[in-house]
Image: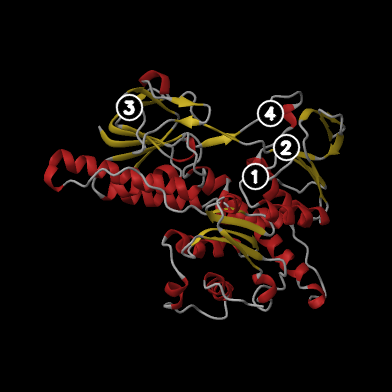
């Protein structure tokens, strides 16, 4: 009998598993694929590694004739490096789990009753069950779909195609298109609507599109893929409008779908939709001692690795609190509903896009003060000649930052700083009471930010 069984072993599961094991609870992780889940093995981690040399190339291109020779990336050597760095991560985490006393069960978990999960022919009982099965790549149902590849395939390419096509306008397509264009391939992106990266500040998205188009990326907006045909090793993609593309490789990046099938939800009466598992404000399913977390949830907040980790840690606290209440009601922690803090989002394109807090478009509609800080231009010596790098902020009536959107190579790190400022409602006075390292990418933007928050004229 276990205290807690997790179905899945990614970030939505293992953070809670480690926390609960530290409280001497008996915990098991059930994993049917690769231990530690998608982000660690086939998503965020390998993607950022594969992109790193192309980020260097982008820096070199911006610095112009300072460099006399532009290096070339060896995809084969890069893939060898990827396997050397990424492949051992699951084994290191396995060591962590083993030291914590967490049992790892390999196979597909099937909930057969409210306290039982079956894996193969073996049944395991637990007081609590946590569903953290994540998502998988959506696949287009079209003629020739067998010729389509997904993000996992892309990040395991043995050699890089000269002509590559991405279907979709989300994170995966545009991040990979940034890599492919820097590699020198001809790149096409098929987009269902008239926009890409819809969740981000659209003026920044337009700046990114303009840059990618200069780098041999062609966007086909308001197009749907009708069929794919193969002949003599080449692929022909045909859209509903009749446009045809001959290409070497096609990535289906039309979204991701939650893994809710074949895990026993119907058996125990857990509510779910095509968007994921429905939970209450305590992340409980319709069966109170069965929780769910991460990308498998039907939720409106961004389905990101950090939110999955946040939910996982929250569930650990919920279970600890419930157990304390059972054994010592007077000393029990209060079972508070989950409250999400400000959540930053980043598109790891070249350059990056990021945002946190209230979207700028929403802030404009509400009459907030909108300010644009052209930190790449003002702080050219710090920002590697990235003249178009900028941050747009929304200021409320108290001149607190309600939202921020950043365009630039350092957008991912800078948005973390802005997350503190937004979440804690820091004022210019608060920032002036702190000392930051100089010169650095962040100190310059903080100085410019304080000027805007104080309504000073920087011209």
Earlier-in-chain disc, 1 versus 3: 1
Callout 4–callout 1 Cβ contact below 8 Å: no
What is the CA distance from the residue labelled 4 to the residue labelled 2? Answer: 16 Å
Q: Which of marks 4 and 3 is nearer the N terminus?
A: 4
Front residue of this view, candidates 209 and 46: 209
Q: Are marks 1 and 2 in contact (CB under 8 Å)?
A: yes
Residue 253 picture quarter? top right
- Residue at numbered disc 4: 140
In depth, the one of 347 and 144 nearer the eye is 347
- Residue 156 visible in the shown view: no
**Residue named by callout 2:** 193
**Circle 3 sits in a helix, a strand or a loop, which is it?**
loop
Identify the residue under disc 1: 198
Q: How far apart are marks 4 and 1 (CA)?
A: 20 Å
Residue, x 70% and y 48% (percent of image)? 174
Helix, strand or loop at label 2? It is: loop
Q: How far apart are marks 4 and 3 (CA)?
A: 33 Å
Which residue is rendered at x = 72% and y = 28% of the image?
Answer: 146
What kind of element bears circle 1?
Answer: loop
Residue underneath mark 3: 287
Q: What element carries label 4?
A: loop
Closer to the eye: label 3 or 2: 2
In this view, the mark in front (4 or 2): 2
Q: Where is residue 189 in the image (x, y as percent from the top left)?
A: 77, 42
Q: Mark 1: few, some, or many residues within 10 Å (few <14, many ≥20)?
A: few
């Amino acid at each position: 009998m276990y205290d807690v069984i997790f179905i899945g072993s990614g970030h939505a599961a293992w953070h809670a598993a480690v926390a609960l094991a530290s409280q001497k609870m008996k915990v098991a992780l059930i994993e049917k694929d690769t231990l530690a889940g998608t982000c660690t093995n086939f998503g965020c981690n390998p993607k950022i590694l594969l992109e790193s040399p192309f980020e260097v190339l982008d820096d070199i291109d911006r610095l112009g004739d300072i460099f006399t020779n532009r290096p070339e990336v060896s995809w084969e050597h890069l893939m060898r490096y990827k396997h050397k760095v990424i492949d051992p991560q699951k084994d290191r985490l396995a060591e962590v789990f083993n030291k914590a006393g967490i049992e790892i069960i390999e196979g597909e978990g099937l909930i057969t009753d409210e306290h039982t999960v079956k894996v193969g022919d073996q049944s395991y009982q637990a007081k609590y069950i946590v569903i953290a099965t994540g998502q998988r790549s959506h696949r287009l149902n079209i003629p020739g779909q067998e010729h389509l590849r997904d993000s996992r395939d892309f990040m395991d390419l043995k050699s890089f195609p000269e002509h590559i096509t991405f279907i979709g306008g989300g994170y995966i397509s545009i991040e990979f298109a940034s890599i492919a264009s820097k590699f020198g391939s001809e790149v096409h992106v098929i987009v269902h609507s008239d926009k890409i990266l819809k969740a981000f500040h659209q003026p920044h998205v337009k700046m990114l599109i303009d840059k990618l188009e200069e780098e041999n990326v062609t966007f086909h907006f308001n197009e749907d893929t009708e069929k794919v045909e193969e002949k003599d090793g080449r692929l022909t993609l045909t859209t509903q409008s009749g446009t045809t593309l001959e290409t070497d490789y096609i990535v289906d990046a039309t979204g991701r779908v939650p893994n809710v099938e074949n895990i026993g939800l119907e058996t125990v009466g857990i509510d779910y939709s095509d968007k994921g598992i429905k939970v209450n404000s305590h992340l409980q399913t319709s069966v109170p001692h069965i929780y769910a977390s991460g990308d498998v949830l039907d939720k409106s907040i961004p389905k990101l690795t950090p939110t999955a980790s946040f939910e996982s840690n929250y569930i650990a606290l919920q279970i600890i609190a419930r157990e304390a209440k059972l054994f010592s009601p007077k000393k029990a922690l209060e079972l508070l509903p989950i409250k999400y803090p400000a959540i930053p989002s980043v598109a790891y394109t070249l350059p990056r896009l990021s945002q946190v807090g209230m979207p700028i478009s929403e802030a404009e509609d509400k009459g907030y003060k909108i300010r644009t800080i052209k930190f790449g231009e003002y702080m050219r010596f710090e920002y590697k000649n990235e003249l178009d790098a900028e941050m747009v902020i929304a200021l409320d009536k108290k001149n607190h930052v309600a939202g921020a959107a950043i365009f630039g190579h350092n957008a991912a790190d800078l948005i973390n700083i802005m997350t503190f400022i937004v979440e804690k409602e820091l004022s210019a006075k608060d920032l002036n009471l702190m000392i930051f390292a100089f010169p650095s990418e962040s100190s310059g933007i903080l100085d410019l930010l304080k000027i805007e928050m104080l309504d000073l004229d920087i011209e």
